[in-house]
Amino acid sequence: MLDFAQHYGFQPRLCRGYRPQTKGKTENGIGYVRKNFWPRVRDYRQAHDLLGLRRRWLDEPCNVRVHGTTGERPVGRLPLEGLRPAADIPAYRALVLERRRVARDCFVSYAGSWYSAPAEYAGREVWVRQTENRLLVCDRDRVLAEHALAERPYERRVIPAHFEGLAARRDRRLREQAEEALAKVTRLPLLVGPEVEKRSLSVYEGLS
């Protein structure tokens, strides 16, 4: 919040809890619009028509009347406020930082979509950081992957290089399991069965 305020050049001031008299009158703005603007709206077909009605309402009765508290017209008082046009300030780039676990298929779930991460991080936790139009997958300060934000839900953003080590990792796990099984077999005692008498096949031919 403080970073946002500094970016746009204003200083927030806290009000005491449960002390409504310390707050400004801006909270009544919705009620003022509901009572004074909407009764003037009879019929409109598109949002463009509604915006035009709003502009005329602001220019004619709203901003030119003498305010009951200040005794001045808002249209004349506004230049004295020293406000900066927001259009001249670059858009604020909000950063969202969250902890995520990489799934076994090397994807990280974020905001309803999936983003790939290097295979060696499957099953591990990473940080995901959203900027204005990118998603960064990080291990502390190290950036592991950078993706463009998904344009629709359930979309998968893939960097093919992330999966090159996946097959090798699976092969290594299978090899380790086979070596472990073989080691268990070699540790088992060798079972020796009874001796079997060896006979010539002519013995069986005479019994037929």
Image (tube, rainbow, N blue to C red):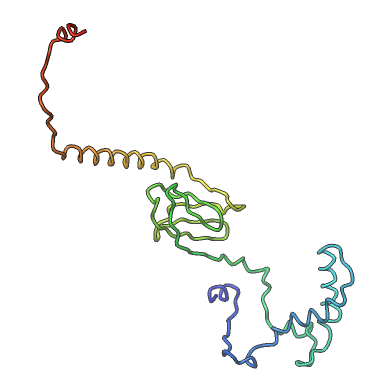
* Drawn side of residue 23 relative to residue 146, left or right: right
> Percent x, y for residue 99?
45, 62
Does 56 sit above or below residue 134? below
* Drawn side of residue 147 relative to residue 8, left or right: left
> Percent x, y for residue 161?
44, 42
Residue drawn at (89%, 68%), measured in percent from left and top? 43
Residue drawn at (60%, 74%), measured in percent from left and top? 8
The residue sitting at the right extreme is 42
* Drawn side of residue 105 relative to residue 199, left or right: right
Does 59 sit above or below residue 129? below
Q: In which quarter of the image is the C terminus?
A: top left
Does 106 sit above or below residue 75? above
Which of these two is toward me, 76 or 55? 55
> Percent x, y for residue 96?
52, 64
Q: Quadrant of the N terminus?
A: bottom right
Figure quadrant of residue 94: bottom right
> Percent x, y for residue 14?
57, 86
Does 3 sit above or below residue 182? below
